[in-house]
Amino acid sequence: MQIHAVGRFIGFGILPCIVGTPEAGEVIGEELFDGETEAAIFPGDLPADPAGALDGSLEADELLGWLGPAGALVAGTVRNSANPTMLAAGYKLNVIPGEAVGYVDGRVLPGFSGEFRATLDELTGPDVTWEYAHEERPLEAPLEAPVMERMARALLAEDPGSVVVPYCMSGGTDAKQFSRLGMTCYGFTPLVLPEGYDYYAMFHGTDERIPLSALEASVRIMDRFLTAPQVDPEIF
């Protein structure tokens, strides 16, 4: 194999892989190569049957392990989650409170609202009541839309050879409100980050920031995206 690259930079880390063009007649796995087609080999403890990534037979944690440090990007979007964030009880130091209230920040995947409710019912038990303080429905958008193709082309022009992978956003978004007007929304905040930059450690932290080089790349990508002519989807 003629090796073109070792590792692929994804967001804030290296996804261990070897990218190259196998020699004509070379066999990798059960695939015979023609000397022109590129291939990527992912060394390490991959499962014997990679099809398990698509048929649901592998656990989420195992799938995330394939992504290395890039797994943090999607770790919050592969299952429902609930984190207690606020507790309140009592009004005076020497009085036993008659009521205690806790607030939980729940993130629910599209199509799994019923599972989220059932899990909270099971965890809280018969002696605790709960209700939504604020509820929004989970959203998902089709990947076949022309706008997806334009976003992918804008990214690939800035970072040729990269792999464009759509994912579910775990944070808050105005798309919840726009969806009530019948609008389909996509999150697109492109950044090309320096190798090893721990972007997600900056979230809501002291001195939260991004490098100027990432901001400059973002401007170029958004400019390409907004000014590119619409063409038929070819990326996905």
Image: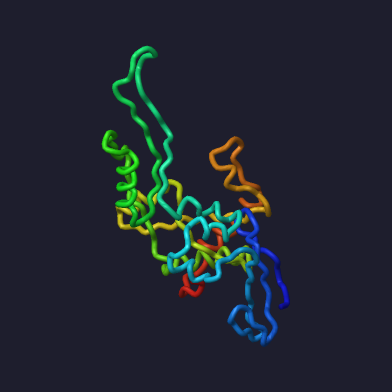
Residue 123 sits in quarter: top left
Compared with residue 87, is residue 236 higher up or lower down, i.e. above or below? below
Question: Looking at the image, can residue 232 be seen?
Answer: yes
Which residue is pictured at 30% across the width and 24% down the height? 99
Q: Residue at x 59, y 82 (%)?
A: 31
Q: Position of residue 188 (x, y in %)?
A: 49, 56
Q: Is residue 87 left or right of residue 161?
A: left
Front residue (pair 111, 153): 111
Compared across the picture, whether 76 is left or right of 68 comes to left
- x and y percent of residue 230 in the render? 47, 70
The mark tally for this picture is 0
The relative height of residue 79 versus residue 83 in the rendered view (above or below) is below
Can I make out residue 227 in this image? no
Residue at point 36% right, 52% down?
138
Query: In this rendering, is residue 213 above or below 47?
Result: above
Q: Residue furthest top?
A: 94
Frontmost residue, 57 versus 148: 57
Q: Where is residue 148 drawn, in percent x and y?
A: 46, 65
Q: Nearer the viewer, residue 82 or 3?
A: 82
Q: Position of residue 32 (x, y in %)?
A: 61, 85
